[in-house]
Image (spheres, grey):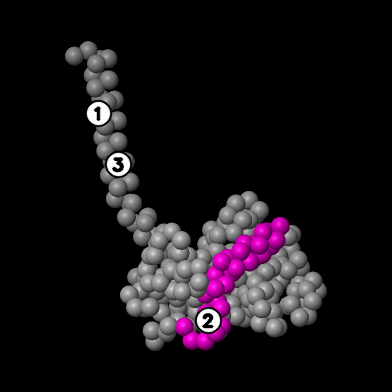
Amino acid sequence: MSDQSTSIAFTVAIALVCGLLLTGAATGLKERKLRNVAVDRQKNILKSVGLFDPDRPAAVAQIEQLYQDSIRCDAVDGTGRIVAGDSGAEALPVCFYVKGNQPAAYILPVDSRGLWGRIRGYLAIEKDGKTVAGFSVYNHNETPGLGGEIEKPWFQKNFVGKRIVDETGAFAAVGIAKGKVTDAIAADRQANYVDGISGATLTGKFLTGGLKEVLLDYEPLSEQFRAGPVSLPAGG
């Protein structure tokens, strides 16, 4: 065999071996990657109801167990009726923070327009159907140090205790003020707003619109909670 043929054969063999190794690595890591994605989702759902503190990291197994013990996910139809599990494309996904088999809060997925891309997170509402229990952001493309502050605990904690109804009990959503709430918002509406982020007016504007859209979509469910105790269907 000529030197040229030997070189070609060697190159082909190396390419095949490398291809097999890369394929094996991708296959082997796929399950781990999927698990990490699932755990990140679980962590942010738990964070929205105050069950996970980002300043106190926990092992993956602990997060999974806490999620299993505290959270159940179902769907809700256009009338606000909760249906167990996946009920098709027309239903909206919703998760519940459960205590003693009863919902202590319900958790809504947020997928809002941002300045540079989508803002994704979770907004949790207390069982009274009026009060925000928490807010978390797990994916965004906002500018670091400006709109990117939406991922910081100091910003997200401002949502706790805010209201999605006005003083009369009518729907009002929750949003981000342009500046300090006390300076920018009338006194009778301050319970519906959090302080804005300096230099990130557009991020606040887009996220305010996104949160309102989400809350309007789930308003029939919120009305059910405002009307009285809500029981979860069996099978969730």
For this orientation, the residue located farthest to the left is: 1
Graded by Cα atoms within 10 Å as few (under 14), some (14 to 19) or many (20 or more), the crowding at tag 2 reads: many
For this orientation, the residue located farthest to the top is: 2
> In the rendering, at what x and y percent does residue 60 appear?
37, 68
Q: Is residue 101 left or right of residue 111?
A: left
Q: Secondary structure at mark 2?
A: helix
Q: Quadrant location of residue 70?
A: bottom left
Q: Which mark is residue 13?
A: 1
Q: Quadrant location of residue 169?
A: bottom right
- From the viewer's perspective, is residue 28 above or below residue 184? above
Q: Amino acid at mark 2?
A: Phe
Q: Amino acid at mark 3?
A: Thr
- Residue 170 visible, this orientation: yes
> In the rendering, at what x and y percent does residue 232 appear?
41, 79
For disc 2, the marked residue is 225
For image coordinates 60% across by 80% down, the residue present is 130
Q: Secondary structure at mark 1?
A: helix
